Amino acid sequence: MSSSIHQPPRDGSAQEQANAIPANPNDAGISDEGIPRPPRHELKSVVPYLLNNSPEFRRLIVAKKTVSSHPNPHISPSHLVLCIKMQDQCSHHTTDQDWRVPATPTSTSGPVPANSAEDPTLKLHRTMRAVGRELERCTNAFKLNPALIDENKNNSVPPTILNLCMAPGAFLELAMRQNPTAEVVAFTLPVSQGGYGSVVSPAHPKVNLKFLDITMLAADIGIEDEEIPSDHVDANNFLPRELDEDQLFDLVICDGLVAKNQPRAEYRAHREKRRLLAAQLVLGLSHVKCGGTFIIRLYRLEAWTTVNIVRAFCQFAATLRLYKPKSGNARSGAFYLVAQDIDIDDDVALDVIEEWRWAWQVGTFGTDEEYEKMAREEGPEVDELLEEFGETLVALGERIWTTQAEALD
């Protein structure tokens, strides 16, 4: 990675500069001055620090400003997103028939047919497979810790994989090819509820595939029945426990994306991203082995929530890599965190689980005031975080922001 000059903000503290950034309640994009606007609740911000200390981040802001100022009048934003998501990045087709779904789906909640070259599930699968291959090539994301492999052999047990938000199944396919004896538990939102189609067959002998909404797994998240208000709109919709408390996995993959067409209660409308993120972090970290690998898709490295997650993982993972594939979604703010050789018994890891369990509770049962208060008070003070983590953040973000800027140029 290229080196950067690190200096303190020139005009006042980082927090003072963060508070000076104009915030539009309905816009987390770019201001007229080219400065990213934090969401209404995101009063803490590292953006001023990054503008002062990261040439790569400044380049990204310029690229975003250019794109927003000169849109292509012949391409609608929704069409552009569809093209990026569905572009065919790979010409090869999967040959393992175990991964294919029968021509007639078994139910409307299960996989969609995958027998047509025009099927959108296959197009998305090929795109995500290209992303996964790039991620594996550059980070060894799907390769298990050798110490855990030896431990499994000594105990005569197969390696294990937990995949949250599995569809379309490309990452799981790559992980199982890397670990062919692995046994898998995978969760994915049913197609009937707005989820993506899957090329993974429920009949696969090594995959326990569960079609459900992981944000409703109250028992697995650690919520007791008596903690659920009887008059809550979803009181009867929360799901029973799906994973044993002592069920642990060598590899956890979290690739969640909020389904736009999912029918859901009104309170979830503006809270679903955080609820989904909370569910993935709590479920994943509660069931990863010490020494295991944790992969999660995150958004906007400069966002306060994301910064705090990355900072925490740096403290309990022996190896941490942030990688933004050039395949598929390079124009967006999405990237992957790959944490290997995790010490899940570390106090910081345990604190992360508890903090995000609380985030799920407030996002599910709390009032709007309680929800916004939680978001405002998230993490330490900005200056405290930057003193400890600022230079590391800049170094981790160089390739992320460069890749996105180059895609936007």
Image: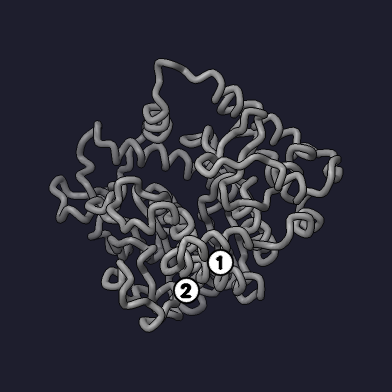
Q: What amino acid is at disc 1?
A: Gly
- Mark 2 closeness class: few <14, some 14–19, many ≥20 residues within 10 Å: many
User: Is residue 307 left or right of 210 when viewed as pictured?
Assistant: right
Task: Pinpoint residue 231: horizontal percent, then vertical percent.
Answer: 31, 74
Q: What's the CA distance linking mark 1 and mark 2?
A: 9 Å
The residue shown at (62%, 62%) is 378
The residue shown at (56%, 46%) is 39
- Vertical relation: 197 (above or below) 253: above
- Mark 1 closeness class: few <14, some 14–19, many ≥20 residues within 10 Å: many
Q: Is residue 178 visible?
A: no
Q: Which residue is mark 2?
A: 248
Q: Nearer the viewer, residue 15 or 147?
A: 15
Q: Nearer the viewer, residue 184 or 5?
A: 5
Q: Which residue is mark 1?
A: 292
Assign the C terminus to one quadrant of the image.
top right
Instruction: Kindly give the residue lying farthest to the bottom in the view shown.
Output: 226
Residue 58 occupies quadrant: top right
Q: Is residue 145 visible?
A: yes
Instruction: Kindly give the residue lying farthest to the front in the view shown.
Output: 369
Find numbered disc 2 in the image and state the secondary structure of the residue it sits on. Answer: loop
Task: Pinpoint residue 144: horizontal percent, then vertical percent.
Answer: 54, 61
The residue shown at (56%, 28%) is 407
- Vertical relation: 213 (above or below) 302: below
Find numbered disc 1 in the image and state the secondary structure of the residue it sits on. Answer: strand
User: Is residue 185 left or right of 375 when viewed as pictured?
Assistant: left
User: Is residue 104 left or right of 335 when viewed as pictured?
Assistant: left
Q: What amino acid is at disc 2?
A: Leu
Q: Nearer the viewer, residue 240 or 151?
A: 240
Tell me, yes or no, whether the two marked residues, 1 and 2, touch with CB atoms within 8 Å.
Answer: yes
Task: Pinpoint residue 318: horizontal percent, then vertical percent.
Answer: 68, 63
- Vertical relation: 225 (above or below) 318: below
